[in-house]
Amino acid sequence: MRYIKILVFIITVSQISYAQNASYIDDLDADFEKAYEYYYSSKDSCYFYFNRIKTTATANQDIPYLLEALLRESWSANFHNDLPIIKKNLRQLDSIERNNKGVIDTLYLRNYYKTSIQYTKGLYEYDLNNYKNALKYFNQFVKTIEDNPDYLEDPEVLKLYLSTTSFIGNLYVKEGKYKLATDFYEKNLRTIRQNDDIGIGFSNNIQILLADIYQKEGQYEKANSSILKVLDYYISITKNNNRVITSYQRVVENHLKLGQSDSARFYLAKMKPFISEKHPLSKIYLASSAQINKALNNYSAAEKDLEHVIGYLIAKNKPLPDEELAQAYQEIGLLHMYFRQPKKALSSYELAIHKIADPSKSTLSQTIYLQILKNKLEALNSLGSYQESLETTQLALDVLDNLKPSFKNNSDKMFLMEDAFPVFESALEASFNLFDQTQEDSLIDKAFYYSEKSKSVLLTEALLGMQATEFANIPKNITEKEQLLKSRITYLEKQLNNSPNDELASELFDVKKTYRELISTIETNYKTYFNLKYNAQVISLKEVQNLLDSNTALVSYFYGNKAIYSITITNNSKSINQVNHHDALEKNINSVYSMLKNPKSNLEDLNNQSFQLYSYLAEPSIKNLNEENIIIITDGLLNYIPFSSLSVNGASKYLIQNHAISYVNSATLFKQLSEKEVMNTKVLAFAPSFTDSKSSKLLALPHNRTEAEDILKYFNGKTLTDNDATLQNFNLESTNYGVLHFATHAILDDENPEYSYLAFQPKENGSSLLYVSDLYNLNLNTSLVTLSACESGIGDLKRGEGFISLARGFYFSGVTSISSTLWKINDASSLNIMEGFYKNLSEGLNKSQALQQSQISFIKDNSQNALSHPYYWSGFVISGNTKAMVTSNNWIWYVVGFTGLIVVGYIIRKRRKSS
C-alpha cells in the first residue's frame, strides 16, 4: 500500500496554547487548505503552499505548524513518489525533535507528532523498497503504541496506527505470508467497527488490500468483487488517481487469469484517463497492456510495452538491490517463454538476478530471487541444459531452506511450498533426462533427493520441533508457556469457527502475536533448538536402502504438472520411471476413486479402469519386485487411490493379493517413525453409541461395540463404550496405552479441514468432538492408532503435504502408525476386517501384512457375493511404521514356554545324575 489517504487535519488555536499571533495562524490555515486542494493533482502547487507554511512557522517559531507542514508535505511526496522531498523533510524533523524536545513534550498533540515521525520513516524506507528497514520503523511505531495504549485515545494517532499496521500487513503479503497479513487487516477492520469516527476510507483501503491477497490465492472473482465495491469512492470522493490506477491494474489481471480478455481490455480503457503524461504510474498501464497483448498472442506489442516499463525503471537509477526492476526483467522473461523463446527468456532472467544483487539481505529479496530461479529452470530445461539446471536447482533449494524458518504460519508455509513446486518438477525433469542420456546411477539418487525435498515439510518440521524441545534443554517454564499459548490459540480458533466474535478475534490476534514472539525468542536464545527444528536435510537413497529389509521395497511418486515420476528402491537396487501427465490420466484416477467409494458401481467397469491405472502407473515400478512388502509414498491425486484395489489382470485379481502395501508421507518421515519404538501394546478402544442423545445428529453404529470388544480377544486393554466413550476419558487415559482404536464417526470439513473431527459419546454439557487442530497439542506415546471411521484418511489435498486429515493430525501428536479410511466405510465389513487385522497382529505379522491378510480373507469369504466389491475392503489403509507388534499375551506364552524348557531340562539332568 504505497499511497495513503490523507488524514483529516485537526489542529485548532486552542490546541496550540503558546501561539501568540492569531492573524498568522489564519494565514497558515488558509495555506493548509490550499495545499490540500492540490494534494493529489499538482505536487508543485502543493509544495508551494507547504513551503510558505514552513517559512511562516519558522519565522514565528511555531513548532506545531512546522512539524505538521513537514509531515503532510512528506505524505504528499509519498503519493507523488518524490523521495528526495521525504528524505530532506526527515532530516529536518529529526533536527527539530532533537533540539526542541522540551517544547514538543508540552504539546497537546505530542504523541501524534512523535508517532508520525516514526511512521514517516517507515514510509520512506517502504518507498525505497528497503522493506526490512520499513518493517523495523513500523514495528517501532506499533511498540510505542502498545507501551502507551492511551495514545490511541487521540483519533489522529489511531488513524496512523491503522495505516501502519496496514503497511505491516502489506509487507507480509510481499513476502508471501498471506495468512499473517490477513490477520493484521482483519484486526484493523475490527478496530474500525469499534470507532465510529474513523472515516470509511480506512475500511475501503483494507478491502483493496484484502483483494490483493484474494488474487494471490487464486480467488480472482472474489478479488474483483472486493475492488469494484469500493472503487467509486476513490474515483468520485477522494479523487485518488493512484489508487484508481492500481485498482484497475488488479481488475485487469484478474480478468486475464479468468480468461476474460475482453473484460480486461474494457478496464484497461477505464484506467487510461487517469494516466496523465509522465505520470509516475504510467508503467502500470504499460504492464497491464503487455499482459493483454500477451493474452491476445500479440508478442511484439507486449514486448514493446514491457521494454518501455524497463526503460522507465532504468531511468530512475535506483541503487541495488532493485527488486522492482528485477521483477520487470522477470516479466519480460516470462513473456519470451510464453512465446517459446527460451534463450531470450534466459537472458532476461540473468538480468533480473543481477538486479537482486545480494538476495540474503531480506526475505523479500529471497522471495523474488526464488521466483526468478524457478522460471530460469524452465528455460534451461527447454534448452536441454540439464546440468546447469541441476546447479540452479541447488541455488533455489538453498534459498527455500533459508526462507522456510521465517514462515511461522503453517498456511503461509504451504503456500510457499506450493509456489516453489515447479522447482522440484524441473529438477526431476533434468535428473531423469540426464539419466536417460547417460545411465549414470547417481542421477537416480539426485532425483530421489529432489522428490524428498518436496514432501511433508510441515509434518517433518513439527516432529523435529518436538525432538528439538527435548534435546535443547529449554527451561520447563518456557515450554509450558508455549504449550499454554498453543492450547489457547486452538481453543479460540474453534470458538471463532463456530461463532464469529470480535472480542475473541482480537484476543486470538494478541495470543498469536505473543506466541510468535515467544518462538522467536526460543529460536534466538537456543540455537540447538533452531538447528534441530529447521534441519533441512532429507534422507538419502542409500540410507533408505539400509533401512529396508530384504522383503520390503519402497516406491516414491512425484506427481508433476507435466509428468509423473516413480522411484523404486530395494535394499540392493534402484530404478526411476517417468510417464506423461495428461487429462485422460486425471479422468481415469477420478473415475476409479468415484467407483471405489460407491458399492453400487459396476465391478467390471471398475476392474477395467483400475487395471488401466495399474498398467500405466504401478506396473512399471513394481513389475520386477519379488519383495512381499511395498511402502508407497503417494503424491497428488494418487493419495485418493488405495493401491491394494488395483486390478492386475482386468478382472477380480488385485494387487493386495501379491503384496502387502503401506503408505508414508516421505522417506525422511519413515526414518523418523522407524526410529521410535513403543513397547506398550495395551489397547484402549472407543465405541460411542449415538443412540440416546437427543442432541446428536449422528446415526448409531450397530456393530462398533462388537468391533471394539473383539480386539480384547487378542490384546490386553480396555474398551470404553456408550457413555464411557467420552472425549474426557480419551484425554485422561490415552497416554497410558500403546494402541488406540476408534470405532466411531469421523466428519470431514471440506472448507476448514483442520475442523474435521472424531465424534465421541455426545454430552449435553461439555465437548464431544476431537478436532484435527486439537491433535497438534497432544503428546501421545502410541504405536498404532486405528481410525475405523468414515473418511478419516482424507481431507484437503495440499501439494507435498498430502491430505490435511485426521490421520495426519495424529502424526503431529507423536503416533508412529495409523490405520485409516479413504471413504465412508460399511459398518459390518469394518467389523470383520478389523477383527482379522488385530488377530493377525497378535500372531506376529507386521501391520501391513496383518491388514493384507485380513482383506484377502474378506475377499475369499465373500467371493460369491456383492461384498467382494473393493468398496467394502480396500478403503482401509495402513501408514507409518508398520513393524510387527509383540503382544503382552505372546510375551506371557514365550516366558511360560521358556520356563517350561528350563524345568524339563533340569529334571532330565537330575535323572541322568541319579542314574
Image: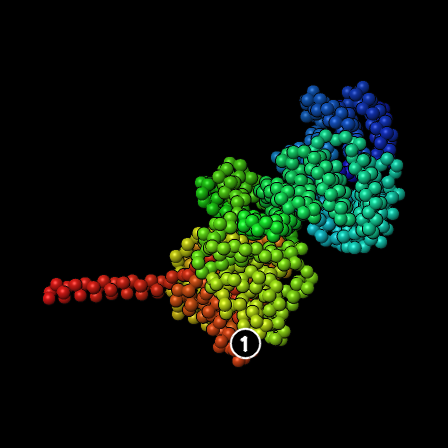
Q: Mark 1 points at which residue?
A: 867
The residue shown at (82%, 51%) is: 297
The residue shown at (74%, 47%) is: 337
Give, as a three-letter code, the residue at label 1: Leu
x and y, in percent, of residue 848 in the image: 47, 63
Residue nearest the viewer, comparing 365 with 496: 365
Q: Residues within 10 Å of mark 1 (few under 14, many from 20)?
A: some
The residue shown at (54%, 72%) is: 653
Is 874 drawn above or below residue 374 in the view shown?
below
Q: Is mark 1 on a helix, strand or loop?
A: helix
* Color style of the picture: rainbow
Q: Which residue lies furthest to the left in this view?
A: 915
x and y, in percent, of residue 380 in the image: 68, 45
x and y, in percent, of residue 394 in the image: 60, 42
Q: Quadrant of the N terminus?
A: top right
Residue nearest the viewer, comparing 725 with 646: 646
Q: Could one spot residue 499 in this view of the protein?
A: no
Q: In the drawing, does residue 726 fall left or right of residue 314?
A: left
